Amino acid sequence: MKKSISTLVLSFAVFTAFCQVTIIDRLPGAYPTGNTDYSITSGESDRFGTTAYTICADKFTLTQTTQLLTADFYGENESNSFTPSNFSIFIVRNSGTGLPLLNNGANSRTIIGNLLNSQVSLLRIPLGPGFSISQFNTITNRTDIAIDFTAANGNNPVILPAGDYWMIAAQYVPDGSPGEITFYWGWLGSTDAAPVRPKYLYNTFFSRGWNDVSYSVVGTNVLPNSLAWRLIGDVNVSSIDETSVSGLSVFPNPTTDILNLDLPENAVVNDMKIYTISGQEVNLKLSIQEGKIDVSSLIPGVYVLSGQTSLGAFNKKIVKI
C-alpha cells in the first residue's frame, strides 16, 4: 500500500527525538585569571572602513551526522566592564594539511565573511536571540559566553555531516573612535588533551598563516593543549529512507549543488518537496531537468527529499555540504 507524503514526513518527526551527547568538554587550564596575557583576545570588527580580526580555532570531530545544540566558551575580559552586543561563530572545514581551511585567494584585506571556508557562518549574533553572557566576574574578569545554535541561526537547526572541523568563536566590535581597544574578550586555554594544538590567525601577520596559540605566563610561553569550551549536540538526526519505487536512487549524497534522481523509465513525478528533518517544509521550488535537481541555494545541513510518483511515494535523506 502506498504511503502518503504526510505520513512519510510524520515518520521522520518521530525519529527526531533528542539524543543529546557531549561532543567537547574542555575546562580552563591552570592559568592565572584576571590578566589577558593568559588568553588570546579573539574578535572581529570593521574598523574605519577596513576589517580587523584575531581569531582562534580549536579542532573537533563529528563521528556521525549531528545537530549542534549549544556551546559554552570559557574566557576572560580585558577590564571589569563588558557589554558586547554581538558575537560571531564560524565552523570551518579541515584542510588537507590539518588546518582550518581558508578560501582561495584570501589575504589580509579579505573581509572576514569571505575569509574562511565555513560550513557554518553565524556573523554578529545579537545578544539575546542567539548568545548570552553566562558568567561575568568583575574581580577575576572571567567571562563565559553561551550559544544556542538554533536560535542564532534564525530558529533553523545547524546540522553537519560527520567529519573534522574547527570551531571559531569571536566577539564582534563595531567601529569606534581612534585609540579605542578593538578586542575585549579572550578565549581561555585548556590543559585537556586534544589531537592538535589550537591555532590563531591575525590579519596583520597573515603571511605567517595559522599559528599555535600560546599564552605568556611569568615571562615564558605556554602552549595550551586545546581551548576551553563545551559543545552539545543531537546525534539522532538520521532519517528513514522509505520508498515504494523499486530502483529509485539519489546521488551524489552528500552534494554541494546538484542531485541526480534516477527513476525507472516509466515513472512520472507528480509532486516533490524538501523538508528539514524536523518536518518543516523548505521554501524551495524544485524542478527536474534531465533527472537533475538544483539544491545549491540550500544552507548546509540534512534534509528529506519527499516525492510522489506514478509508481508510489519516496523519502530520501539528503545532505547538503
Image (cartoon, grey):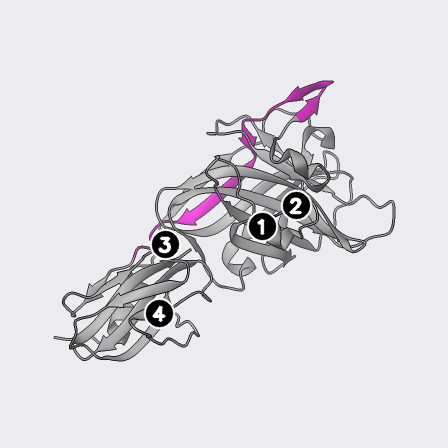
What secondary structure is marked by label 1?
Answer: strand
Region in magenta: 215-238
Mark 1 / mark 3, whichever is N-terminal: 3
Q: Quadrant of the C terminus?
A: bottom left
Residue 242 placement (x, y as % from top left)? 21, 64
Residue 293's tag is: 4
Give amino acid for label 4.
Ile
| Mark toward the viewer: 3 or 2 | 2
Mark 4 / mark 3, whichever is N-terminal: 3
Q: Is 206 or 53 nearer to us in this picture?
A: 206
What secondary structure is marked by label 2?
Answer: loop
Work out how far the residue at label 1 is from the one at label 3, CA to CA, in angstroms. Answer: 23 Å
Residue 204 can be seen in this image: yes
The reply to whether the C-beta atoms of the residues labelled 4 and 1 are less than 8 Å apart is no
The reply to whether the C-beta atoms of the residues labelled 2 and 4 are less than 8 Å apart is no
Mark 1 / mark 2, whichever is N-terminal: 1
What secondary structure is marked by label 3?
Answer: loop
Q: Which residue is mark 2?
A: 107
Say few, some or many: other residues with alpha carbon within 10 Å of mark 2 (under 14 / 14 to 19 / 20 or more).
some
Residue 11 can be seen in this image: no
Residue 89's tag is: 1
Residue at x 58% of width, y 57% of height: 130
Give amino acid for label 2.
Asn
Work out how far the residue at label 1 is from the one at label 2, CA to CA, in angstroms. Answer: 20 Å
Mark 2 / mark 4, whichever is N-terminal: 2
Residue 18's tag is: 3
Residue 195's tag is: none
Work out how far the residue at label 3 is from the one at label 2, CA to CA, in angstroms. Answer: 41 Å
Residue at x 54% of width, y 27% of height: 225
Say few, some or many: other residues with alpha carbon within 10 Å of mark 4 (under 14 / 14 to 19 / 20 or more).
some
